Image (cartoon, rainbow, N blue to C red):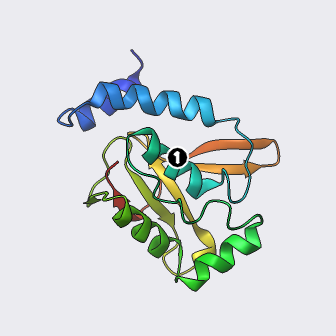
Amino acid sequence: MSRAVVRIIRRHHGEDGLVERMARLETFIRLTHSRPFEWGTSDCSLMVADWCVENGHEDPASAWRGTYTTEAECRALIAQRGDLAAVVAACAAMARLKVLAEPELGAVAVVGSKSNPDRQWSAIWNGRRWMVRWQSRSGPMWSPFVVTPLGIWRV
């Protein structure tokens, strides 16, 4: 067992279903790591919504899927509702996700700048860091970040 896994277990040992959630999250990240990044289908926020669906919730982003095909269209839709934190909070409420003060393994969040909506991303807590789905020059990837979340919800 790696040191990272031991640290995750120590931090989250009191959480129900920890081992099963660790396995589900690891599998989800591995299977979606190389899925093409596509605005309106598999971008950073919709991949987080897919994680919610994977865990038995109704799709919190069903109203958003397929409604935009570019980053500019996505940002315009988000701007109509304030910022990504407001959008994800509304989607989380629709899926009846509980608001958290501290992250649990597999929790979802909006991370980034509170004052700059263009610097906000949806993320999943992997037990140590927030995982954000990126489109890099080399292709799509999940990247870990140490950042303060703007809102956290239990999945």
Q: Position of residue 116 (x, y in %)?
A: 58, 79
Of residue 79 and residue 136, the one placed in the foreground of this image is 79
For the N terminus, the quadrant is top left
Judged from this view, the residue extending furthest toward the top is 1
**Is residue 38 at least partly visible in the picture?**
yes
Q: Position of residue 23 (x, y in %)?
A: 41, 25
Above or below residue 35? Residue 116 is below
Quarter residue 143 falls in: top right
At horizontal 47% and vertical 58% (from top left) the residue drawn is: 147
At horizontal 40% and vertical 69% (from top left) the residue drawn is: 89
Quarter residue 72 falls in: bottom right
Left or right, 46 with respect to 155, comes to right
Q: Position of residue 11 (x, y in %)?
A: 26, 37
Q: Position of residue 111 (x, y in %)?
A: 49, 62
Left or right, 45 with respect to 141, comes to left
Above or below residue 110? Residue 1 is above
At horizontal 38% and vertical 39% (from top left) the residue drawn is: 127
Disc 1: CA contacts within 10 A as few (<14), some (14-19) or many (>=20): some
**Is residue 4 at least partly visible in the picture?**
no
Left or right, 2 with respect to 31, comes to left
Mark 1 falls on what kind of element?
A: helix
Q: Pointer 1: what residue?
A: 50
The type of residue carrying mark 1 is Asp
Of residue 128 and residue 41, the one placed in the foreground of this image is 41
